[in-house]
Image (tube, helix red, strand yellow):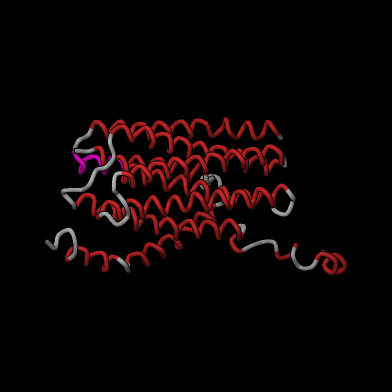
Amino acid sequence: MSASSGNVIAKYLPVYFVLIAIFLLEVFLAFRIDSTATLVPILLLLAGCSAALGLMYFMHLAQERRSLFLSLIPATIFVLAMMNMFWGDSVRLLHMSPWAK
Amino acid sequence: MSQTEMAVQGHGPMMEESPYAIPSRKFTMWLFIISDAVTFGAFLFSYGYLRVATPNWVRPFERGNVINVILMTVVLITSSLTMLGAVDSAKAGDKGKAMRFLYSTMALGAIFALLHLREWFELFGRGITISSGLFGQTFFSITGLHLLHVISGVVALFVVAMKFSRGKLTPSHVETTGLYWHFVDLVWMFVVPLVYLTNFAH
């Protein structure tokens, strides 16, 4: 039993170190790249990679039944569609601070 | 199942299979995670939108502050690793080890919260609060929401750990709580680049 716990830690250590490495790369790039417009997409891409690793290996989505994965897709589409209802409100920001003055 | 067994055990064992053969507890947690992810997504989108569109954005973080962010991130990712150990030990029936991993996860979560609060008080000391402009509003909203999730997670882990040690909860409860904890870690991976690291750009 104890060995099993040790194994799982050892099994996920590569993922752990990759996540740390991606984060340190993000910090390095934040110091190296001066343009915010260039930096933001790169950081978001790296964050997306970290999130995918976390989802697949830490949250075990890669090993879950396909039925769970497939059931989550319509739920995700539904909440994104619901969130889309709020974009109209966010556009009103254009007429408010900081562009109003 | 015989009529006698059904009379003694009830219909529970016969009704164990959930729709799609997914444990309902885990499925519910996933649905919660999806809806919560959208909440964070909306917050982060609004932050990014305002950050990029505002030319004179406040950048209160000095490059020295990066040490604190690195420490917080490493602590949170490590807590996900200990949570994996807790789930695996609980499933393997090693309650003692599962409890040790759960306590480690709680401790790391508490350390993260303390580091976060220290950073907040440092900003308060410099006059940056939630009412001091767009940066304060968005920064404290996002990090406050995340900190609330971390503190709630530590409390939930404590309750689950106590009940699990007494045998009132099963390893699947630990696994479901673990999903939530990993989600909190996952959200932080987006908070750091958008809210902290872009403040080093010029």
Q: Nearer the viewer, residue B9 or B126?
A: B126
Q: Residue furthest right?
A: B4
Of helix, strand and loop, which mostly describes the magenta segment? helix
Q: Quadrant of residue B119?
A: top left
Residue B48, given in percent of the width and then of the height, sits at 27, 51
Image point (85%, 64%), residue name:
B5
Position of A14 compared to B40: left or right?
A: right
* Total count of labels: 0
Please say whether residue B20 is one of the residues in the magenta stretch.
Answer: no
Query: Quadrant where the N terminus of chain B lies?
Result: bottom right
Image point (46%, 53%), residue name:
B148
Image point (57%, 43%), residue name:
B106
Residue B172, given in percent of the width and then of the height, sits at 65, 51
Please say whether residue A39 is one of the residues in the magenta stretch.
Answer: yes
Position of A71 compared to A50: left or right?
A: right
The answer to whether residue A48 is visible is: no
Q: Which residues are magenta?
A: A35-44
Position of A99 compared to B59: left or right?
A: left
Residue A31, given in percent of the width and then of the height, sits at 26, 32
The answer to whether residue A13 is visible is: yes
Q: Nearer the viewer, residue B92 or B134?
A: B134
Residue B180, given in percent of the width and then of the height, sits at 53, 51
Query: Quadrant where the C terminus of chain B lies?
Result: top left
Q: Nearer the viewer, residue B190 or B131?
A: B131
Image point (74%, 51%), residue name:
B167
